[in-house]
Image (spheres, grey):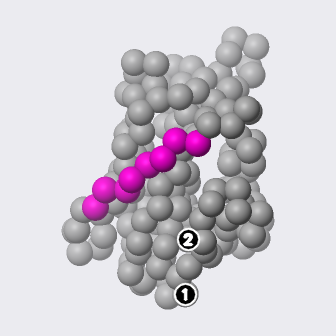
Amino acid sequence: MFYRLLLLPLALASAGMASAAEVAKVGDLEMHSVAAASTELTPEAAKDYNITPAAGRGLLTVTLIKKGRNGKAESVPGQVYAGAVTQDNKLFTIPIREIRQPDGVYYLGEYRVNTPDTLRFLVNANVLGKPLKAEFSRTFNVQ
């Protein structure tokens, strides 16, 4: 599941979908954040994430990664907080849920979006006592 989550941006891009992604780095830590419309998920991914794809619903995925000295990357737990700002400057929080699997831990947040709109995502995490921050935008068109 961990590797499937990391491959989500590639899967969306290869399918011609317009996901938005951001990577924040501090030392040997990385935070990968991806925003996508829930309708862009494959049926398998929607089932794995327990999400019902629908127009006007989005999914934020966050993976916290620690890179070892041997170059091996592993997901690590942390605290993740997220929100978004609409084009008309309305701020809303995105509730985040932690998913633990045998192969790693990751974070998901579902949100509503009124299309067309461009959301500016603000993602903050505390990982092993270190803060990570990301800010990126995603445009959602009429579905």
Q: In this view, does 51 lie to the left or right of 138?
A: right
For the C terminus, the quadrant is bottom right
Residue shown at 77% from the left, 63% from the top: 44
Residue at image mark 1: 143
Residue 33 appearing in the image: no
Q: Looking at the picture, does residue 30 appear above or below residue 93? A: above
Residue 75 appearing in the image: yes
Q: In this view, does 74 lie to the left or right of 82?
A: right
Residue shown at 42% from the left, 65% from the top: 111
21 or 143: nearer the eye? 143
99 or 120: nearer the eye? 99
Residue shown at 62% from the left, 60% from the top: 50
Q: Does the magenta stretch include residue 72?
A: no
Residue shown at 44% from the left, 49% from the top: 96
139 or 74: nearer the eye? 74
Q: Tag 1: Cα neighbours inside 10 Å, few (<14), some, or many (≥20)?
A: few
Q: Tag 2: Cα neighbours inside 10 Å, few (<14), some, or many (≥20)?
A: many
For the N terminus, the quadrant is top right
Instruction: Estimate the x, y position of residue 22 in percent, counting from the top left.
Output: 52, 48
| Mark 1 or mark 2: whose residue is earlier in sequence | 2
Q: Does the magenta stretch include residue 93?
A: yes
Q: Quadrant of residue 66?
A: top right
Residue at image mark 2: 37
Tell me whether circle 1 and circle 2 mark residues in contact (CB < 8 Å): yes
> Given the image, on which type of amino acid does mark 2 rest?
Ala
Q: Looking at the picture, does residue 138 appear above or below residue 29? A: below
> Given the image, on which type of amino acid does mark 1 rest?
Gln
Q: Looking at the picture, does residue 120 appear above or below residue 124? A: below
Q: Residue 110 carries which label?
A: none
**Outermost residue toward the top?**
69
Instruction: Estimate the x, y position of residue 140 in percent, counting from the top left.
Output: 48, 76
| Range covered by the magenta-colored residues | 92-99
